[in-house]
Image (cartoon, rainbow, N blue to C red):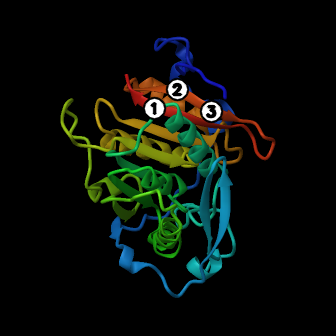
Amino acid sequence: MATNPTFQLFSSSNDKSSSQGLGLFDSPEPPRPPPPPPVEVFSSEVSSSVAFSVDKVNIGQVTLLKGRVNTKEVFGLPNSDLVPGVYEGGLKLWEGSIDLVKALEKETQTGNVSFPGKRVLELGCGHALPGIYACLKGADAVHLQDFNAEVLRCLTIPNLNANLSEKPPSVSLGDTEVRFFAGEWSEVHQLLPLVNDGETGKKGGYDIILMAETIYSISAQKSLYELIKTCLANPNGAVYMAAKKYYFGVGGGTRQFLSMVEKDGVLASTLVSEVTDGSSNVREVWKLSYK
């Protein structure tokens, strides 16, 4: 596993280059249509009209179930990975979700993260494998967010139910609170029940925020980062982020996102793992925490 105690993209805050973009990775994106309003989706709203099947996914020593639904059946769209502002890829299991579960399992084994009693938020959840892992590890609350309510109804909720019904007998879910929220990152905080009140020592905010493959869009990164700061418990909250180093063609990636984090100066970044298996460009898992 590759590790790096801190991330420093620029030599100093006064460096002239720190106020500039990253060249070809900063290409502008076309305007998006107005987002759907944020809404809480209840587990009773699970879709019964869309065909749902599952496959087993072995993630190191962890075995989870991956739901499968048809994009055309859910959205009336061809089988596309992404339609910006309409469908943000929530029906596909992205590599970063697997990377994140692997990283969380290792962090759990080494004592760097512990889920019992913690309040967890997964952003851009889709299949919600990291959030499901948090449930199985004893989190007190797991709240799952995706851009599309249809993803939650047709995939996330049934996938969660399938995984929890297959849990080993030794795993007790206790009183884990699981809730589902749909909406854009700039608005969904209006519904989330746990937000950071900004005062050290208070109990607002989520102890752990999980997100995989959420930073591909430059235009959405600022809203995502502001949402993180709004929701992350201060001072001990932590974000675990899995993403590709660069998303060629759309401009985002860990380097572009972490440059924004660094310039803001609120959160510190630590590299947890790097994946260079040749199946895609370099993938990474980062931990963000308060300085």
Q: Residue 285 appears in which quarter of the rendering?
A: top right
- Sequence-earlier tag: 1 or 2: 2
Mark 3 to mark 2 CA distance (whole Å): 9 Å
* Mark 3 secondary-structure assignment: strand
Mark 3 to mark 1 CA distance (whole Å): 13 Å
Task: Kindly identify the residue that appears in the image at 48 percent across and 82 percent down.
Answer: 47
The picture places residue 185, in percent across and down from the top left corner, at 41, 53
| Residue extending farthest bottom | 49
Residue 244, above or below 56: above
Q: Are marks 1 and 2 in contact (CB under 8 Å)?
A: yes
Residue 245, above or below 91: above
Can you see residue 28?
no
* Mark 2 secondary-structure assignment: strand
- 10 Å neighbourhood of mark 2: few (<14), some, or many (≥20)? some
From the viewer's side, name the closer residue of 50 and 246: 50
Residue type at mark 3 is: Ser
Of badges 3 and 1, the one in the foreground is 3
Residue for badge 2: 270
Q: Are marks 3 and 1 in contact (CB under 8 Å)?
A: no
Task: Kindly identify the residue that appears in the image at 44 percent across and 70 percent down.
Answer: 149
- 10 Å neighbourhood of mark 3: few (<14), some, or many (≥20)? many
Task: Kindly identify the residue that appears in the image at 58 percent across and 55 percent down.
Answer: 30
Image-based side of 79 in relation to 116, left or right: right
Residue for badge 3: 273
Q: Residue 190 appears in which quarter of the rendering?
A: bottom left
Mark 1 to mark 2 CA distance (whole Å): 6 Å
- 10 Å neighbourhood of mark 1: few (<14), some, or many (≥20)? many
Can you see residue 156?
yes
Mark seen at residue 288? 1
- Sequence-earlier tag: 3 or 1: 3
